[in-house]
Each structure stands twice: as structure tokens, then as C-alpha cells.
Image (spheres, rainbow, N blue to C red):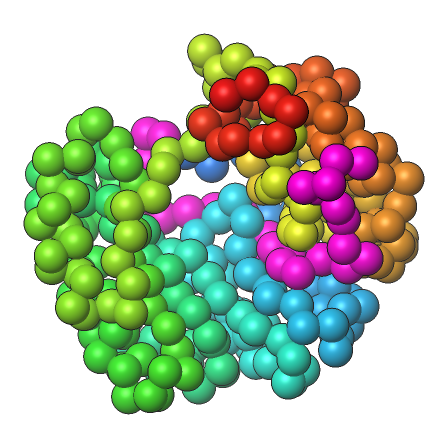
Amino acid sequence: MSKHLNMPAQPRYIQIETILGCDAECPFCPQKQIDRKPVVMSEATWKKIVDDTRGLGITYRPFLQNEPLIDKRLPKIIKYIKEDPTARAEINTNGNLLDAKRGAALIEAGIDLVRFSIDAFSSETFAACRVGLDYRKVVDNVNRFIEAAAETRGSVVTEVRMIDMESSRHEQRDFLEYWSPRADRALIVPLYHWPWDDGVEMVRKPCVKMREEMFFYTDGRAVLCCWDIAARAVIGDVTKESVLEIWNGAPRRAFAEFLSRGERDRILLCSRCDAYRDRRFDGFED
């Protein structure tokens, strides 16, 4: 395996799709195309994922292809995760459902990091990229949570993000100037193309997405990548085997070998993926 993709014996991050669904309909996200079942992950399944990896210093992200705040069990899930003193819990959210009650519950449960995806600095731009949400409501929710998080004296970190898109690029400076003094971090992040989107062509480069991360569907299946919305690269099932058995199992090891050599065409999911196309890898053309 290539030097830059040496695989650890255990994951560092685990994403758990505890529920399917989202309260927004963003044009760059295929979430509404997902029709997998069940809609809700069973308590036995998410607990098994956590129990299988207790004491390993895992960062758990109880969301995948969904808005985590639509799962009313979220504070309970985070509290269960945080029973392990080595564990961290974090979410990415659009902030629309983060009222004062939910915010307080997340902080009390022990959440470590909340990333807010806002992607605009005006109601007009926001309405086009975060369809179905109210900009003023989101901004108010985020500001209130940031203030509450600040009272924890660093125990809860906040991050506000804007995706780098042509439609909102003119607002990036104002976005950073507004949010940087408020949140712990304010970032402009790249827009990734989802594999199998129209016009996406494979690049013959390695992939680092799966090097330290695991991803679980609501039914307990583990997939190679968080961008796999259609189960094109299933590597195991946590209802039938342990998390570490999947991590060190033959399907994942084979995929990792292919990706370390840039052989994305050997994997159905990756055969139409251009992720990390601009990243430099030793021995691969830029």
C-alpha cells in the first residue's frame, strides 16, 4: 500500500445515520433522492456501534445523509456516546431546528463540536441554496447557540461554514467578517461533487476519505464513503459483525488497496468520483 495511505487498525471517526430525512432541499445535495429503509436506525444498532468501539478514542458523528436535528433522540444518543471518557461527539447541521431547548439539551448531553452550514450572507442568496429554510431564523438560532456554547468555556466548539459556490462567492468576505468574531471558527469550504452526479468524471488518484472514517446506514450496513447514497460500496453489516471486524475485513482492505493505487475504476462507487482532484499525491499527476 502507498506510504501516504497506511491504514490504522481502527477508525478515528464514525458517522452514524440515525435517521433519514432533512428539513431543507438544497440543490447541491441528493438527500431527497434516498429511498432506503428503515427511516430510523434502531436503538440496538446505534448502541452496538458505540459499544463495539468504546475506549478507542473515537469521534462519533450521529448523522450521515440527513439533518441530525430531525432525530429527537439526538441528545440521548450523544449522552450515551459521552459515557466513554475517550469519546467525542459532533454534528453538522443547517441550524433550522436548533431552538433554545434543543441547544441546551445538546450542551447538557456533552456535545463537543457543532458545525453550522449556512452558505450565504443574505436572505436572497440563502433562499436559493438552502431551499425551505428561513435565513433570519437560522442566524438567530446559531447566534443563540454560540452564546450558550461560550458559557461552557471551550467545552463546546462552534464552527460556521460557507460552501464555496459561484452563486455566493460575492458574500464570502462579509460572511467571514460577521461570523469570525462570533464562532470559534468561520470557514469557506470546497463544494464536492457527489459520485455519479451528471458530468462527474473519475480522476485516477488515491482517496483519503476512507482512511480513518467509517459510515453506517440506518439498517446497519457500513459503506466505504459518506458520499455513497445508493449502497454502491458496502463493506459490512454491524448487525452481523463487529465494527472492527468490518474495519479490518476483506472487502474494506481490498477497496483500500485499489484506492491507494488510484484504481478508482475497480470500485463501482469510485468509478465516477473526482474527489481530491486538486490534491497532490506522490507518484500521481496533478
Where residue 111 sits in the image (x, y, percent)? 47, 76
For this view, does 245 lie left or right of residue 39?
right
How many labels sit on residues? 0
Quadrant showing the N terminus: top right
Q: Residue at x 81, y 51 (%)?
A: 247
Q: Is residue 172 above or below residue 167?
A: below
Say which of 119 and 202 sits in front: 202
Main secondary-structure element of the magenta-colored stretch: loop
Residue 223, x across and y down, in percent: 71, 41
Q: Quadrant of residue 29?
A: top left
113 or 231: which is nearer to us?
113
Q: Quadrant of residue 202?
A: top right
Give the residue at x 31% y 80%: 149
Q: Which residues are magenta?
A: 1-28
Residue 268 appears in the rendering: no
Camera sees residue 186:
yes
| Residue 20 located within the stretch drawn in magenta | yes
In the figure, 122 relative to 182: above or below?
above
**Rendered residue at 17%/61% (across/down):** 179
Is 19 colored magenta in this rendering?
yes
Q: Residue at x 12, y 46 (%)?
A: 173
Residue 133 rendering spot, x and y as whole percentages: 23, 48
